Amino acid sequence: MRTLRWLLIPAIVLPLGWLLLTGFGRDPREIATPLIGREAPAWTYATLDGETLSSADLTGRPYVLNFWASWCIPACVEEHPVLADAAERLGDRVAFVGVLYQDSPTDAEAFLARYGDAGYPHLVDAAALAVDYGVTGPPETWFVDAEGVVRARKWGPLTDATMREYLAAIGVSG
Amino acid sequence: MRGWIALVGVALLAALVAVVLLRPQPEASTAERARQVASGLRCPDCQGLSVADSPTAAAQEIRRQVDEMVAAGATEQEIRDHFVARYGEWILLSPSTPAWWLIPFVVLLVGAGGLGWWLLRGRSDRSPDANATPLPDAERRRLHDEAEALDA
């Protein structure tokens, strides 16, 4: 009976400790995504500057898909320079694509004029793409590797540190 | 006689219930089916609302896709799977596996069982042990003598 008691203590304490440790390490509002490790959804949309961009145009190149909105304040404002810096720093090594989430092109253009336009394209009228990626609200950023596989998702605003961490997941350093 | 009347009454009532329960259900229209599926999906960017009840663009897009799939002949399960593949089980307002509902009850039962076992064990520890070996007479006498010597 005493042995059983000594076995019961770690049997209860260890899983509880693990649950607390992992639980404190993540945002409880964040929804787990089933897309990691799967082939990224294919898409073709118009961009803010009137062009058409398709995921097929990015074949063989890792890309970062950032769902954002001009009304998403302060989170989208906070992460905007992080995205702009990374896009500028990495050049052609990674494609950066913005996706307007429930936002008008006019408001998005005003946002870019105010906070700086890094020059990468932004998809418009892409509600179906938000559903394909299971987006629950901006900002949300998806990292797709050169093979077209979803490797990571950042829920909430990016920082320099998280940007580097997630870029590493798609094989991009720096 | 009264018994027969009661028996016939029960038989008639049972037949009536069977007719009501087993009658063929009218086929739900496409719009009704779409509404039914949408009301079981969580609106992704609002709180506590189903896709059927939410006005957000995300909910509208999901409703559009549901309508399209229902019109194309997809089953309710296929439509739910389509959205679970994108959002995970979270998108369902009620879990797809009903067994999940049983988990709190199982935990409660296990807890109550453990508590009962612990309480009963405590009681049996305190009660005199019927299987204890009685003291031999010589030992009993020796203890008695020692107790008397202490009292003296």
Image: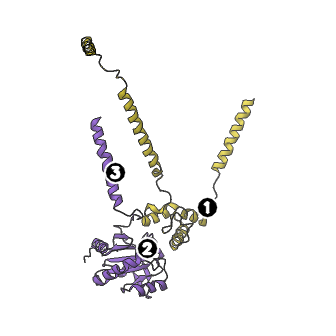
Q: At 30% across and 39% down in the image, what residue appears? A: A5
Real-space Cα separation, disc 2 to disc 1, in angstroms:
37 Å
Do residues under tags 3 and 1 come within 8 Å of each other at their CB atoms?
Answer: no
Q: Colour of chain B?
A: yellow
Q: Which residue is mark 1?
A: B28
Residue B112: horizontal and vertical position, in percent? 43, 40
Q: Which residue is mark 2?
A: A138
Chain drawn purple in the picture: A
Crowding at label 1, few (<14), some or many (≥20) Cα neighbours within 10 Å? Answer: few
Q: Quadrant of residue B3?
A: top right
Find residue A16 and name its label.
Answer: 3
Q: Does A45 appear above or below B141?
A: below
Q: Does A49 appear above or below B88?
A: below
Pick whichever, A35 or A56, lies toward us: A35
Mark 2 vs mark 3: same chain?
yes
Real-space Cα separation, disc 2 to disc 3, in angstroms:
33 Å
Residue B28: horizontal and vertical position, in percent? 61, 61
Disc 3 sits on a residue from what chain?
A
Q: Does B73 appear above or below A74?
A: above
